[in-house]
Amino acid sequence: MKLHIILFLILAPLSPLFSQGAEEKGLEIAIANEKANDGFVGESSEMEMVLEDAHGTKIKRKMKGKIMETTGDGDKSISQFLLPADVKGTMMLTWTHKKKDDDQWLFLPSIKRTKRISSSNKSASFMGSEFSYEDLGSQEVEKYTHKLLKEEKNKEGLDLWVMERVPRNKKSGYKKLKVWIIKKYSNPEKIEYYDRKNELLKVATFSSFKEFKIGSRTLYRASKIHMVNVQTGKKSTIRWSNRSLGVKFEEEDFEKDSLLDQDF
């Protein structure tokens, strides 16, 4: 019997085990990364969002935001637009969940009404940007299957895990996500988003990581996310400044009714 046939017969039955191992390792890494990012208590920050169309025309927006860590479920966050005038006062409230759909509301000051974002509309653009409502929810481990594809180094020599995430929610706007995670930071360096046709839709790059001390723990956060829609040529960038972790908030600050009189 030829050697290549012998090797095929030996290795073929083992291939499901290799696949299972990659998925088990992927889940193990995802859980460890989530744990490494827990314990921030609360976060406050200022943000600048820059929208750029395919012709290079840019629009700048200023925002403030805060996030509250919760126990047993996903985090709660709220963001408010400060500039320019046409979006000033617009706010988005998000309650992320580990298994069920996130709850999201948009407060529109022009009509003084709060609009609930339906689960079927989570893939829509957030305020004309290349970020969708789905992107702005926290990426809970339970919402994806996880698979380790390989390990490699980036240009700076930092070790990376290359992972594949597949949304469990069939209403997701994505077929899959390919994620490059910096081991040192337990956070992504790059994410490729594939649409429901399994074609590359957009690419996010994360940079300018900063270190935060919360008690005896060290956490890392990217200060810049640059999102490029490869199908349209449009781009959106979010930059964080004046960011603080370990901030304590009240639960009522993140209630839907509080959007009417929210004071940052």
Image: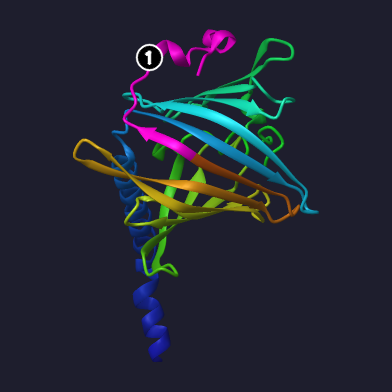
Counting the numbered discs, the total is 1
**Residue 1: in sight, yes or no?**
no
Left or right: where 216 falls relative to 61: left
Q: Which residue is mark 1?
A: 250
Q: What is the residue that sits farthest to the right in this orientation?
A: 55
Q: Is residue 26 above or below residue 139?
A: below
Type of colouring: rainbow
**Residue 134: in sight, yes or no?**
yes
Q: Position of residue 213 (x, y in %)?
A: 27, 40
User: In front here: 216 or 61?
Assistant: 61
Q: In the picture, residue 70 is in which quadrant?
A: top left
Q: Position of residue 43 (x, y in %)?
A: 40, 30
Q: Residue at x 74, y 54 (%)?
A: 233
Q: In the picture, residue 245 is in which quadrant?
A: top left
Q: Position of residue 199 (x, y in %)?
A: 67, 56
Q: Element under label 1? A: loop
Q: Is residue 140 above or below residue 250?
A: below
Neighbor class of circle 1 (other Cα within 10 Å; few <14, some 14-19, many 20+) is: few
Q: Residue at x 42, y 84 (%)?
A: 5
User: In front here: 79 or 99?
Assistant: 79
Left or right: where 117 falls relative to 257: right
| Amino acid under disc 1 | Glu
Q: Residue at x 38, y 62 (%)?
A: 160
Q: What is the residue that sits farthest to the bottom in this orientation?
A: 2
Q: Work out which quarter of the rendered image holds the N terminus and state it.
A: bottom left
Residues rendered magenta in the picture? 241-264
User: In front here: 258 or 94?
Assistant: 258
Quick check: is 114 in the magenta stretch? no
Q: In the picture, residue 127 is in which quadrant?
A: top right
